[in-house]
Image (cartoon, helix red, strand yellow):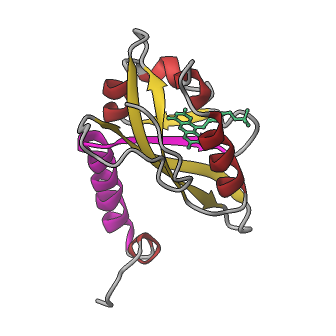
Amino acid sequence: MKENMSIGDIFSYDKKFQSIIRNMLQTTLDISFDGVMITEAGPGYPIIYVNPSLCAMTGYDFDELLGKSPAMLQGERTDQRVLDDLKEKIEAGETFHGKTKNYRKDGTEFIMEWKIVPVHDADDNISHYLAVQLEIKDYTIEFTSVDTKLPFEP
Ligand SMILES: Cc1cc2nc3c(=O)[nH]c(=O)nc-3n(C[C@H](O)[C@H](O)[C@H](O)COP(=O)(O)O)c2cc1C
């Protein structure tokens, strides 16, 4: 087996192995400590998938997030400059890494750190975006919004 095997290599294996890997990927998403969100690449970035950790972090059920824009997590103290940076990066096909203030279903504020990567289709167009997200609870961390280096108050 070659070094640095990719998911693409794994899926070129036989059908039985493909279904095992599919189950493993599903389980990984189900038990992950990080939230995972997948959106369409179109306007408003409609959500097509969230994992249980993302639901636990935000307080929303899967059905409440499906088809909605991740913008529903934003509020008064969400930094627009971080969002502008995010949009510029991901639409240029780059990875975004940032932190911002977000809001749960019950209105409570939390600091969310996330990475967003573009996902390409067979024609190499960006079809979806995938994000891994976690709540920052350790207030001793460096308070910048990572890529943008914008400081913010906890
Ligand atoms: C995959 C993905 C995940 C996102 N997750 C969040 C999030 O958790 N919190 C947030 O404030 N914005 C998030 N965003 C950014 C918002 O979707 C974006 O700011 C909002 O849709 C406004 O976009 P617009 O400027 O095109 O209207 C995410 C975007 C993508 C593509």
Percent from the top left, x then y, of residue 104? Answer: 42, 18
Percent from the top left, x then y, of residue 73? Answer: 52, 24
Q: Is residue 22 above or below residue 58?
A: below
Image-quarter location of ligand 1: top right
Q: Is residue 53 above or below residue 104?
A: below
Percent from the top left, x then y, of residue 152? Answer: 46, 37
Residue situated in front as seen by the camera: 13 or 136 = 136
Whether residue 132 is visible: no
At x 32% / y 32%, what residue is drawn? 52
Percent from the top left, x then y, of residue 74? Answer: 56, 24
Tell whether 72 sits left or right of 61: right
Quadrant where the C terminus is found in the figure: top left
Magenta segment, which residues? 14-40
Q: Is residue 151 above or below residue 122?
A: above
Residue situated in front as seen by the camera: 113 or 37 = 113
Based on the displayed image, in which of its 4 quarters is residue 139 positioned? top left
Dominant secondary-structure state across the stretch colored magenta: helix
Residue furthest out toward the bottom = 2
